[in-house]
Image: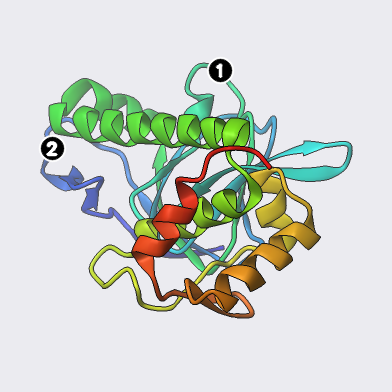
Amino acid sequence: MDTLCHDTAEVLGVDICALRGCSGRLDRLRFPPGGVLYDLDEEFHGIYVVIEGIAKTVLVMNETEVVTGIATRSDVLGADALHTTTFVTRAVAVTPLTVVRVPANVLSELLRGSRAFRAALHFRLGKAIAESLDLIRLLAKARSEARIAFFLLKLASKLAEGRAATQPFNIGFTREEIGCYLGLTVETVSRKLTALAETGYVKVRGRQVRIRNWKGLERVRSKRSLH
């Protein structure tokens, strides 16, 4: 982990330095792939806002990591611990990751003193809840190729800010991690990715993916019945 700078001016679109009564300092931090931002049951010390890269949240069950969430630019990590004194998941960098850490004391000041920050945080947390519900509905009804299409479209959309969504992107995740997130075996993930490539919907090279037929992949995602 590297500290890049102090007194970062903006987080979630709000200029922190311009706020009266906010005396805290923010750190802009960088993590390598596999770097841990916070761990399960670690004392809550603040939230993290993703600036660049991909992170995942995981639970550890029977010594196996279960992926519970994916975070990209502007997503918030650690907010699931706001109701308690400890983090309830582990947050790990999937790709080289840059974040802004908002310490707990500064977060309290921002929530009291900035309507804009409260609104931005509420929006991000609400969006995260909606994405979790989408995943629950998907796991309940969708067949395997629809789950893979959902994952690719979701990640491409989240990473596409400022560029065309059809450009190649690094999914970051291993086949095993994708399977864990979507409730599929590694073999099924590999087979369905190959099938989507053969039908011309995507181009896959290692962890590099390019969506070649966005509308077609959306149709695959819409196939909800389990087979």
Residue 39 visible here:
yes
Which quadrant of the figure has residue 118? top left
- Decide which of 41, 127 is in the foreground and name it: 127
- Residue at the far right: name it: 62
Q: CA distance from mark 2 to mark 1?
A: 27 Å
Residue 72 visible here:
no
Number of marks drawn:
2
Where's the N terminus, which quadrant? bottom right
Q: Amino acid at mark 2?
A: Leu
Which quadrant of the figure has residue 194? bottom right
Disc number for residue 19: 2
Q: Please tell me whether mark 1 sits on a helix, a strand or a loop.
A: loop
Q: Amino acid at mark 1?
A: Thr
Residue at 25% x, 30% y is 110
Residue at 12% x, 33% y is 20
Residue at 58% x, 40% y is 142
Disc number for residue 15: none
Q: Is residue 132 above or below residue 186?
A: above
Residue occupied by mark 1: 84
Residue at 33% x, 50% y is 74
For marks 2 and 1, the one nearer the N-term is: 2
The image shows residue 2 at horizontal and vertical percentages of: 51, 66
Mark 1 surroundings: few (<14), some (14-19) or many (≥20) residues within 10 A:
few
Left or right position of 101 against 112: right
The image shows residue 223 at horizontal and vertical percentages of: 51, 45
- Decide which of 181, 81 is in the foreground and name it: 181
- Decide which of 222, 65 is in the foreground and name it: 222
The image shows residue 94 at horizontal and vertical percentages of: 59, 61
